[in-house]
Amino acid sequence: MADRLRAGRWARYTDPSALCHDHFRWRSSVDHVNYASLCFLIGQMGGRPQTILETGVSAWGTDSTRLFDSYVRSFGGAFWSVDIDSQRVAWLRKSVGGATRLVCDDSVVFLDRWVGEHPGEGADVVYLDSWDVDFSAPLPAAEHCLRELEAVTPALRAGALLLIDDSPGTLADVPVAARESAPALYAEFGAWPGKGMLAQTFLAGRGIRPLRHGYQALYRF
Ligand SMILES: C[S@@+](CC[C@H](N)C(=O)[O-])C[C@H]1O[C@@H](n2cnc3c(N)ncnc32)[C@H](O)[C@@H]1O
């Protein structure tokens, strides 16, 4: 009963910014490095029904899956999130609503399939946050993120929002432990080390610049 009452609370918001603030206040921390960028994103979604795709389900910290789940509970739309870890997916299934679909698969395989199964449909919001990044050796995560971006590109229409986690915009946004090795990676790849290191260069090559860039990179198509 208490669980049902708590879940109901997240379906009753009328102000998306208040929903995001409360999410971080109760489930994460308003001091979290992603607080400002995720609340900016949620604000841009404007309280309208949204089609949302996420790679990498809530693990710790941001708890992004429950944030997007709360958004579609309150404002409508549909939300898909994918993770390769079946235990995390199974655990989260207990706490999401009917407009959220949690999928256990490789994220690139999932995004390819989603695009194929939704011909002519676009996503309003895509959040790329799967393969954990090692900031001193970011290539595996960055290559995976680029493959995700390539797979989801057909769903990114004019107006769509793309947020990439762990994608520093300046050296000051790079975690302290990786700052020494960062300039060499910047010289080689034209972006600071992170999950979105190759995606940023790919998008910049197409004239797409971030709408907002700190620790996370946000694009509007
Ligand atoms: C940083 S966590 C996601 C955190 C979550 N988005 C949040 O903000 O609360 C990264 C997740 O990506 C998943 N992952 C790693 N490689 C993956 C892959 N190839 N496909 C799908 N998920 C993957 C991991 O199992 C992990 O749960």
Image (cartoon, helix red, strand yellow):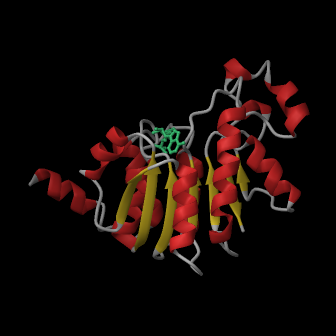
Q: Tell me the residue at 58%/52% (across/down).
A: 108
Residue 17 screen position, x and y as percent: 47, 61
The C terminus, quarter of image: bottom right
Q: Tell me the residue at 71%/23% (across/down).
A: 136
Hey, which quadrant is residue 153 in on the image? bottom right
Residue 36 lies left or right of residue 193; in this view the side is left
Q: Which of 13 and 130 is in front in this view?
A: 130
Q: How many marks?
A: 0
Residue 44 visible, this orientation: yes
The N terminus, quarter of image: bottom left
Q: Tell me the residue at 16%/58% (across/down).
A: 5
Q: Nearer the viewer, residue 13 or 65?
A: 65
Residue 106 screen position, x and y as percent: 51, 47
Query: From the viewer's perspective, is residue 66 above or below residue 33?
Result: below
Residue 96 lies left or right of residue 149; in this view the side is left
Residue farthest to the right? 187
